[in-house]
Image (spheres, rainbow, N blue to C red):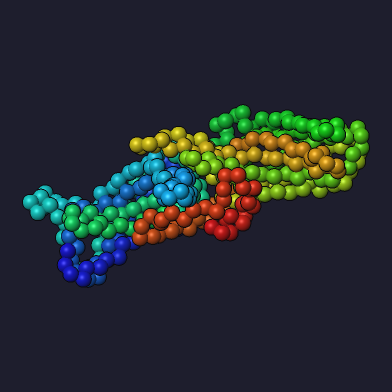
Amino acid sequence: MGCGFSNIIVINLNRNNSFYYTGEYVNGTVQLNITDGKLEANEIYIKLIGEIGYTTTRTVSDGRGNTHTQTQYHHVPFYFSKFTLAQPEVEQQQQQQLVYNEGQYSWPFQILLTEHLPPTINRPQSYPHVRYYLQVVIDKVWYKSNTRETRYLSVFPHVNLLQNPQCLISTTFGNKNRKDIILKGILNKLGMIPGESIIGTLEIENPRKVLIKCINVILLQNYQIGANSRKFKIFETTLPEIINLKHEQIRETFSIIIPPLVLPPSYNFHGGLQAVANVHIHYLIKFTVIVEGIFADFDIDIPIILGTEPNPNPYPDQQQIFHSVTAAEVPNHGQSGFKDNDPPPDYESVVRNM
């Protein structure tokens, strides 16, 4: 490599966004612009990596009786695929090097995303996360550092509710409190899609005519990545017909639309390349009954399956919501501000921060 060498690497995708489903090909081109000097390399290639990132803490002593907590960052790859862009030709085997002078160069690439991969979760720079990225590597001679360029992707697995008939049948639930208020309910099904309606019926027995202030309905997202777990509130609403009632019998039918957000589907993943990567994401519908009196409130949690298809109420292409991120290297360890035992933040506030 000559003196004053500089280059620009750009990863272009054959679509306007960086969102993919498993089973698709990631197609594009890599452009290299050598603006000064000469490039010598053993190989130029692009790789697609899927990995989880999480944190652990440990107490460290300084040897003088003082201790402090140290955060450790862990990355566990679970997917790897390499596509060679350029390597020495047969007649170049003696020198075993690629040589490029000033100018512009371009190579196409195509990499398959296999099935049965976990969804992208959280920002690539935050912890914990599930992230995917393309990385171009210019493999230089041993005494010179390699050049890298990275572009992040968002990947979702297909979760087709029609392939799981159990989540398409109705389910019943119920609970009671210390004041003999009994709540029973029916949900029309347990499998849903963002933009679809949660439809159900509530029946309440209130023999002591205690004041029922309201009933809140909350959709919660829970996920565990490695040793970290988080909980987010996707949305919360109050049933408008059950506010400040003392009736002995209450029956109410409701229909609540799940916001048409781009939400990772329910999924369990257990796999990896050298170490095991565990990812578990699931959703709950929580009914919280607010009742007059001390320790009289009660709630009911109902696990649901959030899928990606079929969608009876299509909304604008979710792929357009994702935006690509390009960085010279995989970003360093910006820790998430949420702890395992914190109350769940509002999902829209998290998306705003993202």
Residue drawn 57% across the image and 48% down it? 339
The reply, left or right, for residue 223 in relation to residue 40 is: right
For the C terminus, give its image quadrant: bottom right
Rendering quarter of residue 285: top right
Rendering quarter of residue 179: top right
Residue drawn 61% across the image and 56% down it? 349
For the N terminus, give its image quadrant: bottom left
**Residue extending farthest front:** 64
At which x and y percent is residue 291?
Answer: 83, 42
At which x and y percent is residue 13?
Answer: 38, 56
Residue drawn 58% across the image and 39% down it? 282
**Residue 119 in view (yes/no):** yes
Residue drawn 48% across the image and 58% down it? 323
Residue sitting nearer the eye, 52 or 97: 52
**Residue 100 in view (yes/no):** no
Residue sitting nearer the eye, 253 or 244: 244
Residue sitting nearer the eye, 264 or 276: 276
At which x and y percent is residue 134?
Answer: 36, 52
